[in-house]
């Protein structure tokens, strides 16, 4: 989330551009989900710019924002970490991936059966969705996304997990105070970390000619 439609538009375009650079520099196919994550985050910001322009409400843009933010990221991040991890690191990663699948399935069910709406609250955009057992779903979401990054073993992915966790806390506090939305800044920093991660990844030896 950003603090205005213009901020979301600028941030979304920049983050999506980083995502294109990540995919363009990709060396291994199994790194594609994580490499494409900035592209997804950029699209997410652009969708929210549409929500701002429409003044909130419960339109298609609001639903699209919720689908990306809730079930899609709960699936995308842990599965991306699992596919990118070397074989010796994968034993710890199926657990957060499984939690992400279950959490994402429940969130999808909620989005199908319960309307989601958005409302402008000063310099923040608030989203309202009636979630059953919300603390449990939030815990599962964080375990799947942040937890998988912290368990990845790769120093840059662990850094990404730590930055995301810290950023989520700060953004949540600012959002509750209705001061200003700053998640777009966290998304931008995360995208740069992933670009560095992609550039440092070795080539897939199996793809090299003998």
Image (cartoon, rainbow, N blue to C red):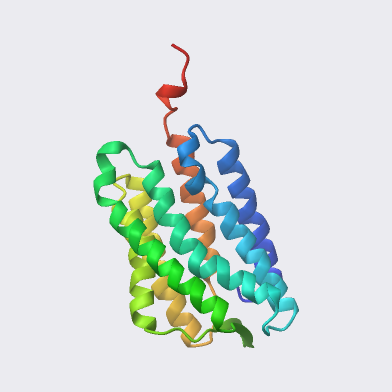
Q: Residue at position x 39%, y 69% from top? A: 141
Res 1 visible: no
Q: Quadrant of the N terminus?
A: bottom right
Q: Nearer the viewer, residue 107 or 1?
A: 107
Q: How many numbered marks appear?
A: 0
Q: Quadrant of the C terminus?
A: top left
Res 27 visible: yes
Compared to 72, does 134 lie above or below?
below
* Side (left or right) of 154 relative to 52: left
* Side (left or right) of 203 relative to 6: left
* Side (left or right) of 59 relative to 39: right
Q: Residue at position x 53%, y 36% from top? A: 26
Farthest residue to the top: give it.
210
- Residue 138 lies, in percent from the top left, at 38, 75
Q: Nearer the viewer, residue 188 or 136?
A: 136
- Residue 33 lies, in percent from the top left, at 50, 47
- Residue 46 lies, in percent from the top left, at 67, 64
Q: Residue at position x 53%, y 72% from top? A: 182
Q: Nearer the viewer, residue 62 or 200?
A: 62
Q: Residue at position x 68%, y 85% from top? A: 57
Quadrant of residue 86 within the rendered picture: top left
Compared to 188, does 112 lie above or below?
below
Q: Nearer the viewer, residue 64 or 159?
A: 64
- Residue 90 lies, in percent from the top left, at 29, 44
């Amino acid at each position: 989330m950003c603090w205005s439609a213009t901020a979301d538009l600028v941030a979304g375009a920049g983050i999506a551009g980083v995502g294109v650079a990540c995919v363009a520099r990709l060396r291994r196919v199994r790194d594609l989900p994580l490499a494409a994550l900035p592209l997804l985050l950029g699209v997410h910001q652009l969708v929210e710019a549409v929500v701002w322009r429409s003044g909130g409400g419960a339109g298609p843009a609001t639903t699209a924002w919720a689908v990306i933010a809730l079930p899609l990221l709960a699936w995308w991040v842990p599965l991306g970490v699992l596919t990118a991890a070397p074989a010796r690191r994968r034993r710890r990663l199926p657990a957060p991936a499984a939690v992400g699948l279950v959490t994402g399935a429940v969130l999808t069910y909620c989005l199908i059966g319960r309307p989601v709406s958005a409302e402008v609250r000063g310099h923040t955009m608030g989203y309202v969705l009636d979630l059953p057992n919300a603390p449990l779903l939030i815990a599962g979401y964080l375990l799947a996304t942040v937890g998988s990054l912290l368990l990845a073993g790769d120093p840059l992915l662990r850094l990404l997990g730590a930055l995301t966790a810290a950023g989520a806390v700060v953004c949540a506090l600012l959002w509750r105070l209705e001061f200003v939305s700053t998640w777009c800044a966290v998304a931008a920093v995360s995208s740069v970390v992933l670009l560095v991660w992609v550039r440092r990844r070795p080539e897939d030896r199996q793809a090299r000619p003998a």
